[in-house]
Amino acid sequence: AQTVTQSQPEMSVQEAETVTLSCTYDTSENNYYLFWYKQPPSRQMILVIRQEAYKQQNATENRFSVNFQKAAKSFSLKISDSQLGDTAMYFCAFSLKGGSEKLVFGKGTKLTVNP
Amino acid sequence: NAGVMQNPRHLVRRRGQEARLRCSPMKGHSHVYWYRQLPEEGLKFMVYLQKENIIDESGMPKERFSAEFPKEGPSILRIQQVVRGDSAAYFCASSPEGSGNTIYFGEGSWLTVV
């Protein structure tokens, strides 16, 4: 079974600075996807970024980028130029390619951006 | 294009009553997923459905919980004889065929059992 671990329950960062959220996962499979979801106080789940395991290039979406280390099974999220609106819970998630597409989530990291 | 629509957003039930949560997927999406989020936890997969078929229900509790996605109408998650431990946020998500595992979530339904 696949597992996802987020070792930082809470983090804080000053506005305009950079923060990195950690995520490790465990799987014996080779083809899979990794995701970061954001859950703001409104509680809606918002997709931040998606990485396909067979792609070596790290995914980037504006201020959000990942550091994907397949051998180490690590998938960290870097948020640059942090904004107050980035305050949220961040969940790392995994799903197998070609399977039922179900996501396995970590327990989340609560990020607070301070003015 | 409307997103994934869930209703009700908030539902209060007494112990022993039934709870029905509805989910209308995004237009053109034929795959529906239900997830449960307990307080201070990440989301846990419950069930994956395509029209009229349950594809994967490995995360569904064996008793009291059922799900359907009929040919016409929304997907329904049904919880019979609710207990306090069923209090949680229930998220529905949908995806089209060949989405490359990217699914889109609704805003969730909050069930409180009193």
Image (tube, coloured by chain):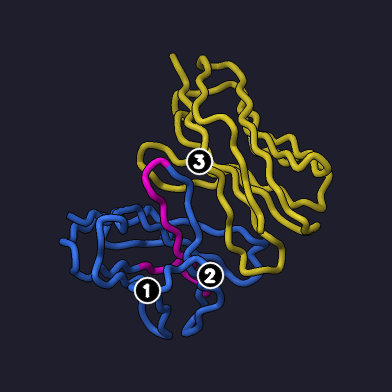
Chain colours: A yellow, B blue
Cα distance between the residues tagged 3 and 1: 32 Å
The image shows residue B112, relative to residue B16, as above or below, that is: above
The residue located at (69%, 54%) in the rendering is: A33
Q: Position of residue B43 (x, y in %)?
A: 47, 51
**Chain under disc 1:** B
Task: From the top left corner, tell me how far across and down residue A71 is, in percent.
Answer: 83, 42
Asked if disc 3 and disc 1 are in contact, CB closer than 8 Å, the reply is no
Residue at mark 2: chain? B
Tell which tag, 3 or 2, sits nearer the viewer.
Answer: 2
> How many other residues sit within 10 Å of disc 2, few (<14), some (14-19) or many (≥20)?
few
Q: Which mark is residue B58?
A: 2
Q: Residue A57 appears in which quarter of the rendering? A: top right
Q: Are dots 3 and 2 in contact, CB under 8 Å?
A: no
Left or right relative to B93: residue A52: right
Q: Chain of mark 3?
A: A
The amino acid type, in three-letter code, at marker 2 is Ser
Residue A14 lies, in percent from the top left, at 51, 14
Q: CA distance from mark 1 to mark 2?
A: 13 Å
Label 3: state its secondary structure: strand
From the image, state whether disc 3 or disc 1 is nearer to you. 1
**Residue B57 seen:** yes
- Which residue has dot 1 on it? B63
Q: Viewer-nearest of labels 1 and 2?
A: 1
Mark drawn on residue A38:
3
Q: Earlier in the sequence, mark 1 or mark 2?
A: 2
Label 2: element kind = loop
Q: On the picture, is A25 further left or further right than B46?
A: right
The amino acid type of the residue labelled 1 equals Glu
| Crowd tier of the residue under label 3, counting other residues whose Cα lies within 10 Å: few below 14, some 14–19, many 20 or above | many
B92 on left or right of A22: left
| Residue stretch rendered in magenta on the structure | B23-40
At mark 1, the secondary structure is: loop
